[in-house]
């Protein structure tokens, strides 16, 4: 009996033990076309590899795969591998606390050994599945896996990036962490050419390739705080800071992290920092909080709030068949 044949048989034994709660030695021997003694030797091989195989003697006894002190490698068939990859892809969206990053690591490990024919099946499932949320940019699962591996292995990544001006540029970065807001994915990385930390939207990346260039760890900002500051402040024409008479945690429940940043203040107040292309839009969304608000900056936001108040007053007093109109002073 060759080593390859023994290894294949032990893996088949592992698959059988994972398929059903309990097996007798005779049942396993019949399935594997070997003797009961050979089954006992293979069980010892599995135990040596860290698999907790329990044996119950007597009538009704048999072998059972139990829980151990550490997780040994799992043996998945094709259907189980596809189901696991799809589930990990969905879990990586970050809806469960702490699950997103772990799901990405597991997805990267699974993708590394998954045959190409199974990858095609996983892509087919994603391509035919919709979710009941607003339209969001679709991120290729292979891009997520490439970046997850690069973050794990500390290797540089090259990709083509579409900037806000519509132009495409080649970028080389040292990735640290991916952050998801639930609607978009971002990568925090050290931009080699710009010699600074940058945030990149994954839906603007193309032809991402992990290189073999390893980089040393460097001190970096908190990825979540860095990405939040980038997405709530940098892209917008206006940046507003207002004091809100409410506990910070309550305002954070009302304002998504990709929309605004909430800072602790004093005496039951907090500071909300929010960006936007229109001061009217900012005023309307802050008014929806239903808390007392003090405008810190910019001063023009007070004028936008006054105009909004006059519009709402005119709307409330207008009779049916009449149009309420307010002109900007």
Image (cartoon, grey):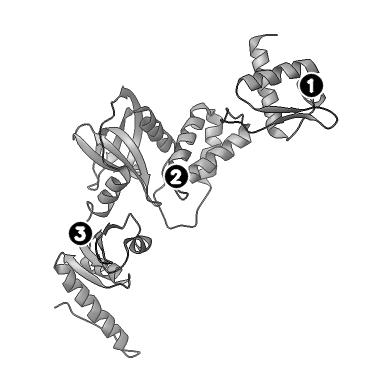
Please name the residue that numbered disc 3 is placed on. Answer: 239
Give how far across and how far down residue 245 sits, in percent.
Answer: 28, 69
Whether pointer 1 and pointer 2 mark residues with C-beta atoms closer than 8 Å, the reply is: no
Q: Residues within 10 Å of mark 2 (few under 14, many from 20)?
A: few
Please name the residue that numbered disc 1 is placed on. Answer: 29
Give how far across and how far down residue 258 sits, in percent.
Answer: 33, 54
> How far apart are the two marked residues, 2 and 3, measured between alpha carbons?
31 Å
Dot 1 lies on which element? helix
- Which of the two discs, 3 and 1, sits closer to the camera? 1
303 relative position to 259: left or right: left
Q: Is residue 280 above or below residue 189?
A: below
> How far apart are the two marked residues, 1 and 2, measured between alpha carbons?
43 Å
Q: Residues within 10 Å of mark 1 (few under 14, many from 20)?
A: some
Q: Is residue 274 above or below residue 100?
A: below
Q: Earlier in the sequence, mark 1 or mark 2?
A: 1
Residue sitting at x 70%, y 8% = 1
- Which of the two discs, 1 and 2, sits closer to the camera? 2
Residue sitting at x 63%, y 26% = 51
Q: Nearer the viewer, residue 98 or 197?
A: 98
Give how far across and how far down residue 25 sits, in percent.
Answer: 79, 24
Q: Earlier in the sequence, mark 2 or mark 3?
A: 2
Quadrant of the rendered image containing residue 59 = top right
Quadrant of the rendered image containing residue 248 = bottom left
Residue sitting at x 24%, y 79% = 309
Q: Nearer the viewer, residue 74 or 125?
A: 74
On the question of residue 34 being in view, the answer is: no
Q: Is residue 240 above or below residue 13?
A: below
Dot 3 lies on which element? strand
Please name the residue that numbered disc 2 is placed on. Answer: 98
């Amino acid at each position: 009996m060759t080593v390859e044949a023994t290894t294949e048989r032990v893996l088949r034994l592992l698959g059988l033990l994972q398929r059903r709660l309990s097996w007798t030695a005779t049942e396993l021997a019949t399935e594997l076309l070997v003797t009961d003694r050979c089954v006992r030797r293979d069980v010892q091989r599995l135990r040596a590899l860290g698999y907790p195989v329990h044996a119950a003697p007597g009538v009704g006894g048999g072998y059972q795969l139990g829980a151990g002190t550490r997780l040994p490698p799992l043996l998945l068939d094709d259907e189980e591998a596809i189901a696991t990859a799809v589930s990990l892809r969905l879990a990586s969206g970050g809806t469960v606390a702490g699950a997103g990053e772990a799901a990405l690591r597991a997805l990267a490990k699974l993708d590394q050994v998954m045959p190409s024919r199974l990858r095609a099946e996983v892509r087919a499932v994603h391509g035919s599945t919709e979710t009941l949320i607003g339209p969001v940019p679709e991120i290729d699962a292979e891009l997520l896996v490439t970046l997850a591996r690069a973050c794990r292995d500390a290797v540089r990544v090259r990709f083509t990036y579409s900037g806000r001006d519509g132009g495409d540029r080649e970028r080389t970065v040292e990735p640290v962490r991916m952050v998801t807001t639930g609607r978009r994915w971002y990568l925090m990385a050290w931009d080699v050419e710009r010699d600074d930390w940058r945030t990149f939207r994954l839906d603007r990346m193309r032809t991402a390739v992990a290189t073999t260039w390893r980089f040393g760890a460097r001190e970096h900002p908190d990825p979540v705080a860095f990405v939040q500051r980038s997405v709530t402040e940098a892209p917008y024409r206006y940046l507003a800071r207002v004091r809100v008479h409410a506990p910070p945690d309550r305002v954070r429940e009302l304002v998504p992290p990709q929309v605004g940043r909430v800072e602790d203040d004093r005496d039951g107040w907090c500071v909300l920092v929010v960006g936007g292309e229109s001061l009217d839009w900012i005023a309307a969304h802050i008014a929806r909080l239903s808390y007392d608000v003090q405008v810190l900056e910019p001063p023009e936001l007070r004028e936008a709030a006054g105009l909004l108040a006059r519009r709402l007053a005119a709307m409330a007093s207008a009779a049916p068949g009449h149009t309420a109109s307010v002109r900007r002073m």
